[in-house]
Amino acid sequence: MNKIWTWTGAAWLLGAGAGFAQADAGAAPAAEMLTLAELMRMGGWLMYGLAALSVLGLALIGYYALVLRVRSIAPPAQALRLRELLKEKRGREAREFCAQQPTALAAVAAAGLDFLKENPNAAPGMLKEIMESEGARQAGRMQNMIHYLVDLSAVAPMVGLLGTVIGMLRAFNSVAFDLAKARPMELAGGVGQALITTIAGLIVAIPAMMAYSWFRGRVIKLTGLLEGAATDLLAILENRGA
């Protein structure tokens, strides 16, 4: 009988403890997610600068995705047509074709054709230098184009760091003059600004750096395609002329 009462009392205590725990959990206020407007307000005016940088980064990524393509650099159809025209020694039509479809390959071919037009008796080595120089210029243009993403990924964390310094300074100033009158809300506001701007800067910088790495691989691939197509055209020009 004593064992029955013992087990009954233990069960009641366990049930009561669980009930009190559930009551405390229900009474505790649930943490609410901050809205974007609240985050902008807490982060201060630097958040608007970071938002502008994020918009700029998205615009650059979209632009590079449209521009850095095979059809814009060295389209196979254009390379095939140029080879046909050069083999048939139709240099004038080849120049017009390059003007109608302005790509990187067209610029390299046009540089070679213009050089041959002005210097018909030039040494073959000079033609190679002219076309390689134009090809290097086109490759450098693509490299310089995507370098803006690197600049963006470097500037965004610095802006976030500036917000961190301003937020910490704001928190310290709340207790610097009168420790007795310091309010926790003022401290929390300064620390919150420091953390929010730091996170925002990293959120802008990390995708920008990842996008740069991806576009760098694409530029390397496109540069190889451009070099191959330009080499074929150079061989035709050296052997048959325009």
Image (cartoon, rainbow, N blue to C red):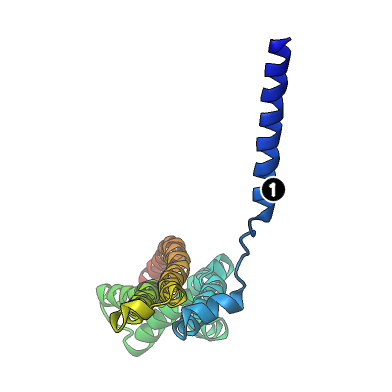
Which residue has dot 1 on it?
Answer: 23
For the N terminus, give its image quadrant: top right
Where residue 27 sits in the image (x, y, percent)?
A: 67, 55
- Report crowding for label 1: few under 14, some 14 to 19, many 20 or more residues within 10 A (C-alpha): few
Res. 214 visible in picture: yes
Task: Say whether residue 210 is left or right of residue 123.
Answer: right
Q: Residue furthest front?
A: 2
Residue 74 on image: x %, y %: 50, 69
Whole-percent x and y of residue 196? 46, 71
Q: Residue at x 29, y 84 (%)?
A: 177
| Depicted 141 relative to depicted 19: above or below | below
State the image quarter where residue 182 is shown.
bottom left
Q: Quadrant of residue 100?
A: bottom right
Residue 56, above or below 71: below
**Toward the viewer: 108 or 156?**
156
The quadrant in which the C terminus is found is bottom left
Which residue is at the front of the view, 205 or 212? 205
Name the amino acid type tagged 1: Ala
Residues 37 and 202: in front is 37
